[in-house]
Amino acid sequence: MSGDEDYKRMFHQALRIRLVEERIIDLYPSDRIQSPVHLSIGQEGAAVGVCNGLRDTDLLFGSYRGHAYYLAKGGDLKSFFAELFGRATGMAGGKAGSMHLAAPDVGFQGCSAVVASSIPHAVGAALAARRLGKDQRIVAVFGDGATEEGVFHESLNFAALHDLPVVFVCENNGYAVHAALSARQAYSISKLPALYGIPYTRIEEGADFVAVDKEFTTAVADTTGPKFIEIMTYRSKEHVGVADDFHAGYRTDVEFRDWQAKDPLVQDTALVEEYQPAIEGEISEAVNFAETSPLPAPEDLLADVI
C-alpha cells in the first residue's frame, strides 16, 4: 500500500471516530445514552496510529477514555451504540456502558473506569503469552494521571523483571481531570521508564496518526521485552461529558487552537468532505439499530456478572 493510500485509510479511521464522538454529543442531552462518556475528540490520532500496526491477535487494554481504541482496533459500531443506549444487543448486553467496552474477537480486551487498573491486566497477558509461546504484542493504554498510581510502578517493575513483551502507551494530554501535571506531579513521566530499564520513546505530534504509526512501529519492532511510549496529545472536550470547559479556568482556548492547527481532521477539509457522508450514514444506521433494540430482560440482570 502506498503512503498516500495508507494516509487516506488512517484518515478515514480517525474521521470515523471523530464523527462518532460528535454524534454522541448530539445525542447526549436526550438521555438516550445511559452512562457517562469520556470523549476521544482530539486524541484520535494516537489510537489510529497505535492500532494501525496491530493484528487481531495482538491484545490491547484501554482506559475509561476508550471509544477511539475500541473503534480503531475493529470493535463493532452497532454493538458500541447499543451498549451506550443500555440495550441487550450491546457488546456487554447493555450492562457495561462507555467505560467498560470490550471486543475480544479483535483483540480489544477491555477498559475500566478505575484509573490504571488495566495496566496489570496487560502485564498478566504478556506473562501468559511468554509462557505459552504465543507471538503476540500486548499493549496497555493509559493517561498521564495513571502514572501516579502504585500499580503503574508495580507493573513496570514486574514487566522489566521478567522481560515481558508488553508496550506501555501513555497518552499525555497535559491534564489529570482539571489539574495541569505541573500541579500534581513532581516528576517527569519521561524519566520513569529508565528507573526500570525500559526503553522510552516520546511522540510529539499525537494528532498526526502517520507519525504515531511510524514511531510506534519502530519502537515495538523488537518484541523481546517491555517498551514505553509517551504520546503527547490534547483532549478537546471536558474530562467527562460532552461540553467545552474553557470557562472552568484550568486551561484556555488558545492551546486548543494551537492543537487544531496540527489536526489533520481540521486541516484536510477535502478528505473530510469526501468521506463524511458515507460515515454519517453508517453512524445513523448504528444509532437506529441501538434505538430499535430491546432493553435487557429483568431475568438477565445478573447474567454474566461475576
Image (tube, rainbow, N blue to C red):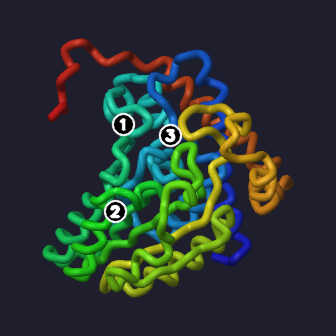
Q: Amino acid at mark 1?
A: Met
Give the residue number, with chain letter if any, for mark 1.
91
Q: Amino acid at mark 2?
A: Leu
Q: Amino acid at mark 3?
A: Leu
Task: Determine whether 29 is above or below 245 in the image.
Answer: above
Question: Residue 89, position in %: x, y?
Answer: 37, 28
Question: Residue 270, position in %: x, y?
Answer: 85, 55
Task: Determine whether 124 is above or below 235 in the image.
Answer: below
- Give the residue at x 48% y 61%: 185
Dot 3 lies on which element? helix
Give the image quarter of residue 242. top right
Task: Determine whether 58 is above or below 67 in the image.
Answer: below
Give the residue number, with chain letter if any, for mark 2.
59
Give the residue number, with chain letter if any, for mark 3.
77
Q: Is residue 122 visible?
A: yes
Quarter of the picture containing the N terminus is bottom right
- Give the residue at x 34% y 33%: 96
Question: Residue 226, position in %: x, y?
Answer: 34, 78
